[in-house]
Image: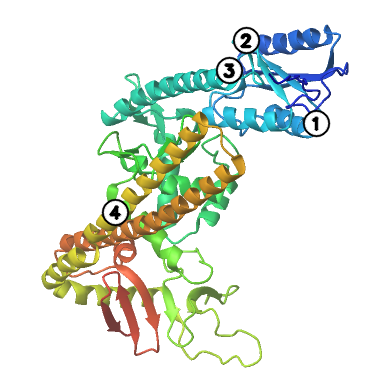
Amino acid sequence: MRNVTVIPPSIDRYTTAPISSKAKRKVAAYARVSTEQEEQQSSYEAQVDYYTNYIKSRDDWEFVSVYADAGITGTSTCNREGFKRMINDAIAGKIDLIITKSVSRFARNTVDSLTNIRLLKEHGTEIFFEKEQIWTFQNSGEILLTLLVSMSQEESRSISENVLWGVRKKMSDGKFSMSYSTFLGYDKGEDGTLVINEEQAVVIRKIYKLYLEGLSTHTIANILTEEGIKTPKGKDKWSQSTVLSILTNEKYSGNAVLQKTYTESFLTHKSVKNDGRLPQYYVEDSHPAIVSNEIFELVQQERERRKKTEGHYSGHNIFSSKIICGECGHFYGSKLWHSTDKYRCTVYRCNQKYKKGEGHIKCGTPHLKEEQIKACFIVAVNELIKNKNEIISNLETAKKLLCSNDSIEAECSELQKELNVIVNKVQMYISENARVVQDQAEYRSRYNELVGKYESLKTQIEEKEQLISDNIAKSRIFDVFIKELKKQQGLVTEFDENLWCSLVETMTVYSKEKIVVRFKNGMEIVTAK
């Protein structure tokens, strides 16, 4: 019989330190509470105090620090600065052991938790979970951790989904809530419904009117600031973004689109734009309107027109960025003539007509007075009205052909199916990594490859959805155009601002004898000043 002598290990396989070493272990603790309420704050302070004293009381331990996060959710490590600093210090060799209260204090996200535990293990740092009495260097540690972390994650998911279900059920019933203190134009009525605040509604209507008169959001913001009108948040200075948010909020037309955004994951808590992944709820006539549906739609059309305008949009009046020089293609702008005498008047001419510079040729297009522009429009729109029945019929046919989204939606649906397959693969891969120890570098490489495919498909879907959105916008233009034509029972005798804004795309000036009015349906009519 062979004589076998066991030679015990002399080096710890995790820490690489000699087993017989009497050196103290460098110990840190991690503490976290998920809200900043007073009772939670005292719990946070108690944890920090407890771990500081506990570690310092051990002769074989060397106190490093208590890493802590207060008022931070446990479902993700992304925003936990104390946690990330602790991981970096451990990787740098500053920590041998981390003590924390429980698995749920460490993380409620299985992927984050196991990834970080394995990362720390690779760098010789052990974790001790007090409540569960788990040491991560023990053989049974990882099995217990996988089970416990999954239970914690499921608890977070269940709580989150219960809350969301209640919110979505309310939306499906056409009910919604809003922050009245920062929403200009409405107050909360006694029965919980929206009631128009007439004093504030005047400001809302003014913003819509100024925009349709051609003013830019920047100019409108300056006017409101100069007039001393308070913003929705009670501030003195208005911004373009605040004006734009009012111009694009359908609630001012008495309707409500619900679930514009949603929480992408209970793990990340990130709010994202609802791009069609979840149902939206359009509630018509949900509350009293401050502006009419027609005015609201005209504003949305004008926004789209200005987006497509080449160069900087000049927002001064309803003619801004609509009258074009037929020679150089630049816009006409308003100019004040004879500002100091009785012949004072405003005229419109090409902005580049007298541009200085080598090689510049002065445009020969004529200037126009406001009365002449209005007269040309009246002539053009009356030509349109003479054949309105035929034009309306052609427009309705064109709308069906140009604005149909059937084929695009079918393509989008197929891409979504492919995306769902990728999502399922990612989820299965993450689940496998939680159950089976894998090479993390290889895992990340395969994971990133799947994410790359996901991003590519997502981009394609977004492009299709943009096409769908563009077609919906075009359809609205057709609808308003048709509606305005149907309303005209006779020839137009005087200039109508709403008619100008809803029908005219551009007016191009070539000469005194040739001025072309292009309507939003693509039709062009030649007039003269």
- Residue at the (31%, 76%) spot, across then down: 518
Relative to 276, say whether 73 is above or below: above
Q: Residues within 10 Å of mark 2 (few under 14, many from 20)?
A: few
Q: Which residue is mark 4?
A: 414
Quarter the N terminus occupies:
top right
Q: Secondary structure at mark 3?
A: loop
User: Identity of the amino acid at label 1?
Assistant: Gly
Badge 3 is on which residue? Answer: 140
Here the colouring is rainbow
For the point 62% across and 12% down, the residue is: 40
Residue annotated with mark 1: 93
Quadrant of residue 290 in the image? top left
Outermost residue toward the right in this view: 22
Q: Give the Cα separation between the discs numbered 3 and 2.
A: 11 Å
Dot 2 falls on a residue whose secondary structure is loop
Question: Nearer the N terminus, badge 2 or badge 4?
Answer: 2
Specify whether 400 is left or right of 352: left
Residue 242 horizontal/vertical position (percent) = 52, 45
Task: Please identify the residue farthest to the front as the structure is shown.
Answer: 1
The span from disc 3 to disc 1 (Cα, nearest Å) is 25 Å
- Calculate the distance from the C-alpha at mark 2 to the C-alpha at mark 4: 50 Å
CA distance for labels 1 and 4: 50 Å
Q: CA distance from mark 1 to mark 2?
A: 24 Å
